[in-house]
Structures are given as structure tokens and as C-alpha cells.
Amino acid sequence: MSIAAGLTVCGVLAAPVALAQGSVFQAVPVDEANFILVSAPIGQGERSQLNIYEQRTSKRPCFSVSGSAPAMVDPLLSTFDFTGICSRYIDGNGYSLRIGGDDLGTRYRLTVVNTGSDMELLAAPTRDRSQPTMLVARSGGVASGFLKLSFEPGWSLRRRAYGKKGLGHLYIYRDTAPQS
């Protein structure tokens, strides 16, 4: 959706000017080796949500991973005061979807779905249900507990930045929308 603005030149209203779309924020790359995407069980584990853990210093491990397909995650940060050592992003205040220059945080919800054979991270439209649901990441199998999610090709993590200042919000990012 573009916004039109009128321009007054010498007291005469000129033709409307289209303002640039996108976000006032930039999406800057991060060292993904310091992050892990996790399918985290809710309550008794019948549903799951996305958690993202960041290892900020080497003082103490924030998480450990064992096995594969699916890989189990032990969220070690839940056992100590992780202030300054780890960051934890557990909901839409900590992460959102971005494709290219378009922040889709209000138009798409990131949700973890158990398909019966896999845990999938999906980006589902919240306003316009005719928009596509996008597969973002998957665990490679199903098990109880915390599972590592691995990005599908083309997806990555970026940090929200304002000017040159990195902010405490992450983007699940892709340059262009995936082809159906």
C-alpha cells in the first residue's frame, strides 16, 4: 500500500508523489552460528511455539544440541541467570517476518505446526487469507521436547537496525518471496 502526498510549489498543489514503501528499519546480517531456532513445547507439549536463542558470549553455553532428524535442544539458559550471556526471543515482540524491504510482522504470523511426521515453522497470513502460507523451517522429524528447526533454502536470520544501531528484534528473512 503506497501513500500519496501532495507537494506545494509556489503556492500551487502539484501532482501527488508516491512515498517509498517498506520499513524505517534495516535488516542486517547476523552470525547465524550464534543462534538456534527451536520448536518449544507449550504446556503439556501438545502445541509448540518458535523460540530463538542467541549465544552472546562464550562465558557459559546457552543451549546444547544432541542427535539429528530431529535434533533435541536442551535450553540451558533456563537453568541460570543468562543476562548478558544469552538472548531469548520467544514471541512477536522478539521476532517477525521480513521479505526484502517489507516488514510483514503485522501481516504474517510465525507458527510451529506438527504435521505428524515433522515440526514445521510456517509463515501464515493474518489479514489476507488469499496470501500464501510459506514453509520457513523444519525439524526433520517429531519427538517430545525442544527440537531444532533448520531453515529451508533462501531463509536466514537478520537483526532489525535503525540507522547503524542494532536492535533487540530479529527478522526471519528472505530476499524475495518463495515461488509456489
Image (tube, rainbow, N blue to C red):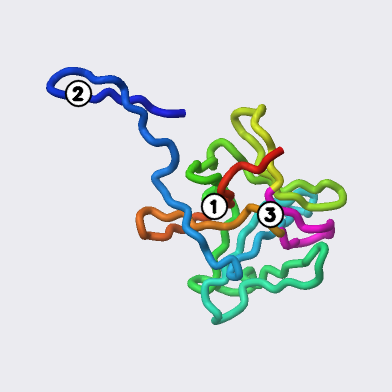
Determine whether, in the image, residue 42 is placed left or right of residue 19: right
Question: Residue sitting at 50 percent across and 41 percent down?
Answer: 102
Query: Is 20 rendered above or below residue 150?
Result: above
Q: For this rendering, which residue is in front, 43 or 70? A: 70
Q: Looking at the rendered structure, which numbered label has been put on residue 136? A: none
Is 148 within the magenta? yes
Residue type at mark 2 is: Thr
Query: Residue at label 2?
Result: 8
Q: Nearer the viewer, mark 1 or mark 3?
A: 3
Residue type at mark 3 is: Pro
| Quadrant location, the C terminus | top right
> Extreme bottom residue here?
59
Q: Secondary structure at mark 2?
A: strand
Query: Is 67 rendered above or below residue 135?
Result: below
Q: For this rendering, which residue is in front, 130 or 38? A: 130
Distance of mark 1 from mark 2, alpha carbons? 38 Å
Question: Which quadrant of the view contains residue 44?
Answer: bottom right
Q: Position of residue 33 (x, y in %)?
A: 61, 70
Determine whether, in the image, residue 140 is placed left or right of residue 76: right
Query: Residue at label 3?
Result: 153
Mark before the other along the chain sequence, 1 or 3: 3
The residue segment tinted magenta is: 136-149
Q: Nearer the viewer, mark 1 or mark 2?
A: 2
Q: Secondary structure at mark 3?
A: loop
Query: Residue at label 1?
Result: 171
Q: Position of residue 37 (x, y in %)?
A: 66, 60
Q: Secondary structure at mark 1?
A: strand
Mark before the other along the chain sequence, 1 or 2: 2
